Amino acid sequence: KAFPYTENKVLLVDPDDYYSRVLTHEMTHLFLPSVKPGQASWMSSVDKYILNEALVEYVACVVHKEYTGESFWEEKERYVSENVDSTMLN
């Protein structure tokens, strides 16, 4: 889990995830800007969380693919298009 709001930007990672895209995702939290709890009062806390996580996940997938060749984002898009009936989610 990444804690980007702390002064020292702490990153706690399970050793089993060290060589996976999970590490890339958590490291991305430390570098991307995010909607803070006091910002964008028109958004619910759930909306802020989803926006932040979606942006981090997309960038992490792009970075991970660049360095490993594994394409997780395409798999996620395929799963959603085949299994979820939601225009908003797409």
Image (tube, grey):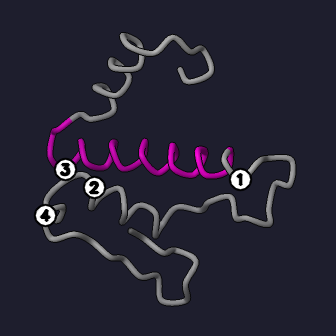
Return the disc, 2 or 4, that comes first in the chain's sequence: 4
Q: Residue at x 56, y 15 (%)?
A: 86
Inspect the image, locate mark 2, and give the three-letter code of the amino acid beneath it. Answer: Val
Q: What's the distance in space between the residues labelled 2 and 3, CA to CA?
A: 14 Å
Marks 4 and 2: in contact by CB < 8 Å?
Answer: no
| Image marks 2 and 1: residues in contact by CB distance under 8 Å | no
Give the side of residue 88 with respect to residue 77, left or right.
right
Residue 6 in the image, given as x and y percentages of width and height: 55, 84
In primary-sequence order, the first of circles 2 and 3 is 2
Distance (Cα) linking label 1 and label 4: 30 Å
**x then y, percent, for residue 53:** 51, 49
Q: Residue at x 68, y 44 (%)?
A: 47
Q: Which x, y percent locates residue 24?
A: 30, 58
Q: Mark 1 highlights which residue?
A: 45
Cα separation, mark 2 vs mark 4, equals: 10 Å
Q: Main secondary structure of the magenta part?
A: helix
The disc placed on residue 22 is: 2
Labelled pair 4, 3 in contact (Cβ < 8 Å):
no
Q: Earlier in the sequence, mark 1 or mark 3?
A: 1
**Up-down: is 21 above or below 8?**
above
Q: Amino acid at mark 1?
A: Ser
Neighbourhood count class around disc 1 (C-alpha, 10 Å): few under 14, some 14–19, many 20 upward: some
Of circles 2 and 3, the one toward us is 2
Amino acid type, mark 4: Asp
Residue drawn at (42%, 70%) of the image: 2
Q: Which residues are magenta?
A: 47-70
Q: Which residue is mark 3?
A: 67
Label 2 – label 1 distance at C-alpha: 23 Å
Residue at mark 4: 16
- Disc 1 versus disc 3: distance between alpha carbons? 33 Å
Report the mark closest to the observer, 2 or 4.
4
Per the model, the C-alpha gap separating discs 4 and 3 is 19 Å
